[in-house]
Image (cartoon, helix red, strand yellow):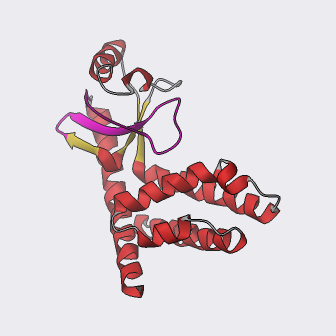
Amino acid sequence: MHLQTEIEELLTTFVKLLEQLHWHEPNRFLGSIQRAGTVGQWYDVVLGIRSAANSKELRDTDNEQVHKLCNEILGVIKDLDDFFIADVSPRSAEQKNAWLRAVMPAESGQYAFRRDGCIRISLLDATLEGASIRVRRMWTHVCSGPGSTTDFELELVATQTLDIQGGLEKLAAAKSVIKSWIGQQRQKE
């Protein structure tokens, strides 16, 4: 399937599910996603929805349909996350030690490495410069919400650089589709 078509389908499914959820359980998210002015704002609302769909905010109801919709929304968000989040794992003990030195001074640095040994970063908030990536937001093993803002740089090996470049290309395609959707929302206002 063409990447842009895949993203458009995910976005359409996500918005339809969010509209259905709002119909069954009025919430702040439908309006927030429609008012988002940038891709970053849009994705921050998505992160809020993910958190709420896993918590009492949306699940504190006996309505089976709300629970079903929350589960479906979480599945779509998981697919959307593939465009916004990258897991980067050190390839050697030396690289892990270098990364430890880089992340420890950063806020939340002590939690940077997840249980599986990777660092989960927001591609939306990262910059690839040659063979290094500047990380500005990450998800730690103690956080599944909007992530922790931080600032550190990781040196990458060639295969990691290619993986991040591929992830950034997928993100660019997602941003294009979402910007178009945001523009359509502005025209409706």
- Above or below, 59 against 31 in this view is above
Q: Nearer the viewer, residue 105 or 82?
A: 105
Please state the horizontal and vertical placement of residue 50, each as a whole percent of the image.
Answer: 57, 52
The secondary structure that most of the magenta stretch takes on is: strand
In this view, the residue in front, 149 or 83, is: 149
* Magenta segment: 129-155
Left or right position of 71 against 102: right
Is residue 146 magenta-colored? Answer: yes
Q: Nearer the viewer, residue 83 or 165?
A: 83
Residue at the image position 41 percent from the left and 41 percent from the top:
86
Can residue 42 be seen? yes
**x then y, percent, for residue 57:** 65, 53
Name the residue: 41% across, 51% down: 84
Point out residue 180 in the picture as x, y percentages from the top left corner.
35, 75
153 shown above or below 102 = below
Camera sees residue 166: no
Figure quadrant of the C terminus: bottom left
Q: Is residue 173 above or below residue 128?
A: below
Query: Where in the figure is residue 126, as x and y percent of width and height?
Result: 28, 43
Q: Quadrant of residue 16?
A: bottom right
Q: Is residue 137 magenta?
A: yes
- Where is residue 66, by image quadrant? bottom right
Question: Quick one: which residue is furthest to the bottom in this view?
Answer: 188
Considering every residue shown, the one lying at the far left of the view is 130
Q: Residue at x 37, y 22 (%)?
A: 91
Query: In the picture, residue 43 is in which quadrant?
Result: bottom left
Locate residue 121 relative to residue 6 in the image: left or right.
Answer: left
In the depicted view, which residue is nearer to us: 179 or 93?
179
At a point 33% along the width and 18% down the height, the residue shown is 100
